[in-house]
Amino acid sequence: MNIALHHFRLIDTISKEGTLTKAAEALHLTQSALSHQLKELEKELDIEVFHRQGKKLHLSEIGYRFLRSSEKILSEIRTMEEDIQNYKNGKTGKLNISMQCYTAYHWLPGVIKYFKSQWPDININIVSDATQRPLEYLMRGDIDLGIVRTQMINTKINYEPIFDDRLNVILPADHPLTKKKVIQIADFQDQELIMALYDPTYQDTPLIETLIQEQQVRPKTLNRIHYTDATIEMVNAGLGISVMADWIVRPYLANRNIVAKPLHHSVAKRTWYAATCKDTPTIQNFLSCLKMYFAENQMCLESENFEEARQLQVV
């Protein structure tokens, strides 16, 4: 049988309206066109769908069976259309994100909480495997948004600055370098240094390691650890020192035996970007939440840094 979607709409509408005239008006058809479609269907089925009594139409037994299917099919189509529209409007769907270098996401619940208050049906997924090569994952479509500090020259990628941070040296509380107000690259000489894992084939040597090489500074050891939490615990245990952004390390300072000291201002400040390849309502909505969160976070950090600088001047 060759039954089309407009046949289901036809039977559903005639059943609700009761006459061909009213059904034709509801479907924005002429009565002649509607009658033709009904005859076409009954010819295809080789059975009457409606019994005629003057201008009134009454469903036959097969007509009732056809109507039950029409109600189910049309209801599913309406649901599908609504789902598609919600997806296009950024009300439903999923968002895959990742962050370059760090595996710490203590900042994310605050962003998600606000985002979910407005778009509760969007699922946010962290793609941890993309940490070392987020832009490649972005280009492949494996993530929708990457928070990155380096940029790949590619016209398909859009970069939008979202915040600046400041690099700190993370030390055990009893480490001799804690006596210094500001840490220099030269201070890494003969130190047991713990740095984030990176892929040298990515052609993105971390800034600190580049400066260490340029200044011919030789740490005693240089260990690479992928996970931010593991690095913090290594420093806390007195097994070395590390370098991290102020906003990443701040939550760890309260309940551990570690201290954060600023690197010299000439190398400490960096800009982070939101990298995207697509422009969808969901991405734009999440980007707005990111900007708001980090704007507030940066104000707190700048206030703390100002107070720290003031105290240092007093001393």
Image (cartoon, rainbow, N blue to C red):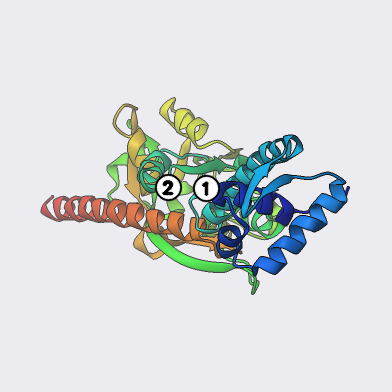
Query: Splitting the image into 4 quarters, where does residue 309 fall?
Result: bottom left
* Amino acid carrying mark 2 in the image: Trp
Query: Splitting the image into 4 quarters, where does residue 225 fall?
Result: top right
Percent x, y for residue 218? Answer: 56, 49
Q: Which sits in the foreground, 39 or 113? A: 39
* Amino acid carrying mark 1 in the image: Thr
Residue 119 — which label? 2
In this figure, which residue is indicated by the disc labeled 1? 92
Per the model, the C-alpha gap separating discs 2 and 1 is 7 Å
Label 1 element class: strand
Residue 3 — which label? none
Percent x, y for residue 293? Answer: 34, 52
> Is 233 left or right of 72, judged from the image as shown?
left
Residue most extreme to the front = 54
Percent x, y for residue 172? Answer: 38, 32
Q: Can you say whether 21 is above or below 240 in the image?
A: below
Q: Which sits in the foreground, 138 or 192? A: 138
Which of pointers 2 and 1 lies earlier in the amino acid sequence?
A: 1
